[in-house]
Image (cartoon, helix red, strand yellow):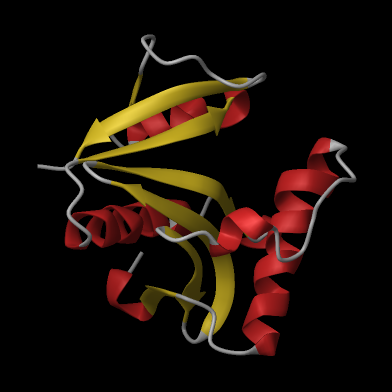
Amino acid sequence: MIEFEHCLRAPDDADEWCAFHVIRRKVLFENRGKADYVNNHPDDFKPGNHPLILLFRQEVIGVVRIDICEPEAWLRRVAIREELQRRGHGRVLLRLAELFALDNGCSEIRTNAAIEAVGFYERCGYVPDPAKLSPPNSVTMRKPLR
């Protein structure tokens, strides 16, 4: 996987926002049997919250929201387009998200990983955090950034 072909940034226009919502809705809601996805959720626009898209060769292929709560950042709603999963794009997304968190003054990054994604996060250097209460069907995980 060539990282320099990727870019993590905020959506620029209506088409990129549409792609952002399509990926989140399909991968994180519909594929999990949930029908309650909300476009333009208020949490996406709270101060310190950063909805971002992952581009590969100028095409939107992934999404994440990074909530900055110094000294930590929280990864929310991480997803790669279904047909592009298991090709290294998720690892690149995490590396770029970690750099974003560092650039925003964070020394640790956290996420509430879906049970089926725990192994992926562990392979990327995250560890379960038993001190934090996890939402249902997820495990709170953390990774120091410095």
- Name the residue: 70% across, 58% down: 41
- Name the residue: 58% across, 69% down: 61
Q: Is residue 26 visible?
A: yes
Q: Quadrant of the N terminus?
A: bottom left
- Judged from this view, the residue extending furthest toward the front is 47
Q: Is residue 85 visible?
A: no
Q: Where is residue 64? Give x, y as percent.
A: 51, 57
Q: Is residue 19 left or right of residue 53?
A: right
Q: Where is residue 140? Give x, y as percent.
A: 45, 23
Count of all numbered marks drawn on residues in the image: 0
- Name the residue: 77% across, 56% down: 25
Q: Where is residue 79? Give x, y as percent.
A: 59, 53
Q: Is residue 136 left or right of residue 110?
A: right
Front residue (pair 67, 26): 67
Front residue (pair 46, 11): 46
- Judged from this view, the residue extending furthest toward the top is 130
